[in-house]
Every structure is written in structure tokens, then in C-alpha cells.
Image (cartoon, rainbow, N blue to C red):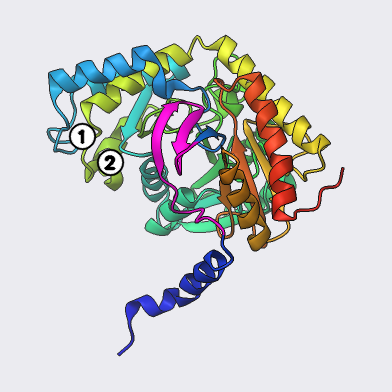
Amino acid sequence: MGDLFDKFDSVIAEKAALLATGVNDPFNLVMEKVHSPTEATVNGRETILVGTYNYMGMTFDPDVIAAGKEALDEYGAGTTGSRVLNGTYQGHREVEEALKDFYGTSHAMVFSTGYQANLGLMATMAARGEYIILDADSHASIYDGCAMGNADIVRFRHNSVEDLDKRLGRLPAEAGKLVVLEGVYSMLGDIAPLKEMVAVAKKHGAMIVVDEAHGMGFFGPNGRGVYEAAGVEADVDFVVGTFSKSVGTVGGFVVSNHPKFEVLRLVCRPYVFTASLPPSVVATAATSIRKLKHAHNKRQHLWENSRKLHSGLKAKGFKIATETAESAIIAVLMPGQEACARMWSALIELGVYVNMARPPATPAGMFLLRCSLCAEHRAEQVDIIIDRFVQAAEIAGIPLDA
């Protein structure tokens, strides 16, 4: 009789072979103590954090922390219930009001994670006989939401306006269609040509979702995301986002102006059948979102940090996934998995934490070290990161083009 774990033997063997080379385990790291949005103790060593998605540095904001403590004292540790039963407290309404104010929308719906927000929207909005059209590089939560539903799934080439147009043109004109885009793609840090893509989707009569998980907080005049910067707010039907990036806590949401939006609270299974977020979490989120609306100086500094790291690493001979700093994600390409792991391990030993990314999270055959900048990184920290990348490359035997 077969062991159900047998199907994972290749993964187990691959990891064992990697660790046998003597590198640190890139997928089992423990933050022993977190001191600030940019510094932690890892393996007993003071470490600069460059892989946490803490874009706006809100995790240690005094007002955010105070709001969480007050809600914990007043409402307790959790709700022990779904939003449609006993799990909606005053704080859940307040965070949804904060989202509506931030995005300028009529409706906002908060989920327990960003993953569930995508899972719920994709699985619910398109049914049998309808279509979801998505970028081939879409996030796993989008793909999983598609798998959970009954719609027909059509993929188009990453960021290809032409391919999106062609594939939409092949679908029945009368069928319901949902085009799913992301403002910032999290692996490479590249942004979608939303102005052109939204125009194509509208031409074919499709509704549009834009996932702004990695764009909220610092794209656009109000920090709403790439879709705001592209000037397509009036044409986007849904914006999906998360609290675990720029907002600095955990949770997910969908905002919309559609007049029938509120019915989703009754028909969206990941919303109906999940316990709601703890009161302390929604209190921190609401406070953070209100502050992000006016965080213009932080937005500017984050962009300065991103451009500095991108140009600095490129000047040292590293291969970067994008020609310029398109977002706060700087993806440094590596020649293979073992080289990538050696480089990651050397950086950890030098006191710099980044994300090691590999297939299936990345496109096939691509291995990279993903840096995500924070508005709280000081300029001198960015200089240190660049210097330690150079040292790590020498230790790991990674050739540079400089």
C-alpha cells in the first residue's frame, strides 16, 4: 500500500541535497527578536531586514501599537465567530470604514487573510459558463481561487496587452468575464500596464479585478496603488489588498463601488465560514490605514531607497529582473538553485535577510533573491546592504558583470 507522502519524495530529496552542501536552511529561519521594521536578531546576529514586505514600516508605529493594546484590553483576544454570526465587532466596521475612506469606494469587505480575499472573490464571482482571464504570473491565491470555483480559466502571457486582447476576443461575447490583474507582481517587482489592459478588458465587456497587495501605500497620489497611478480608478470593479504588507498586520480586503457588492457577504464561502480577525488586529489595521492616507514623506523616502538599492546593485554587476526600480521589490537573479542558496546563506552570515525564491513561486527555471525595501530603511543601511551583497557574492562564488 502506497504512502500518501510518497508523492513528495522528490521535494524531500531536493531539500536534503541542498542542505548537504552546508548552506543555512532558507525556509526555516527564526526571527529571535525583532527590534524595528528594519532590524532583527537572527541566529544570534544583528540583521538588516530586506525581505519582509513591511513597505511603510507600520509594524512598530506607536499609534498602531497603542490601538491594538487598547482593543485587546477592551474586547479580548478574539471573536470566536464568523463575520456573518457573532464575529463582527465595532472594530471590524471601523476598519471597513477606514478602507472606504482610503480608497474612495462605497463598499469594503474584510477577510481574515489576503489569501482568503483572493480565494473568495475568484471562487464566487465567476461560475460555470463564465470566464476568468488571468495573467500567467498571477499569485497562488488567485490560482487557488480559480480552482475552487467552476468558471473556465484562460491565461494570457505575462503583462502582454496584445495576448489579453486576443484571448478575450476568442470568448463568447455574451458570457460573463472577469479579468484579474496585479498592480505589482511580487516575484520580479514589475508592474502591469494597467491603463492599456483595463482599456482592452472594457472593450470586451469584462469586469476587472486589480490586486494591489504590493502597491498599496506608495503608488499614486493617495497611495492606493498602481491602478490609481495609472488613472483607471473609475474603470476597475474590484481592488483586492492585504494588511500584511504596507498596513503592517494581517488580514485581507476587497473594495468596490458596485451597487450589488454587499451580497458577497452571504455567498462568499471563505468569508462566511472563517472566524473573523481578532479585535486587536482590526484596530491596528484601521489606525495604520488612516495614517497611510497622509504618509506622503514616507512614500517619497521608500522610492528613494528602492532606486538607490536597484542602481547600487546593478552598478556592482548584479543582474536585476527589471531595468529600473519599478516598485519596492528588487529581484536579484541567480544562476541556479545551489548558487542562490549559497548566496542567501552568505548574506545571512553577514547579517542581511532577503527572500530566496524558486519555482513554482517564480517562472520556470528562475531562481532569485528578492529584496523588499522599507520606508524606514536609512540611507546608510542601503549602502551596507549593497556592500554585503558584494561580499556574499565573493563568498558564494557568484560571478559579477561589473
Q: Where residue 76 appears, x then y in whole percent?
A: 13, 26
> Which one is nearer the viewer's eye here, 382 or 395?
395
Q: Where residue 129 appears, x then y in whole percent?
A: 45, 57
> Which one is nearer the viewer's eye here, 17 or 141?
17
Q: Is residue 100 above or below residue 315?
A: above
Residue 133 seen by the camera:
yes
The outermost residue toward the bottom is 1
Q: Where residue 153 appears, x then y in whole percent?
A: 52, 57
Is-magenta flag for residue 41?
Answer: yes
* Left or right, residue 100 beside residue 22: left
* Cα distance in 3D space between marks 1 and 2: 7 Å
Residue at screen point 68% across, 20% down: 304
Q: Which residue is mark 2?
A: 271
Callout 1: few (<14), some (14-19), or many (20+) C-alpha neighbours within 10 Å? many
Residue at screen point 56% across, 28% down: 235
Please tell me in which quadrant of the rendered image residue 101 appears.
top left
Q: Is residue 187 above or below residue 97?
A: below
Secondary structure under the numbered disc 2 in the rendered image: helix
The answer to whether the residues at label 1 and label 2 have Cβ atoms under 8 Å apart is: yes
First in residue order: circle 1 vs circle 2: 1
Is-magenta flag for residue 213?
Answer: no
Secondary structure under the numbered disc 1 in the rendered image: loop
* Left or right, residue 3 beside residue 101: left
* Left or right, residue 46 beside residue 261: right
Residue at screen point 36% across, 47% down: 124
| Range shown magenta | 23-45
Q: Which mark, by number, is residue 83?
A: 1
Disc 2 marks a residue whose amino acid type is Tyr
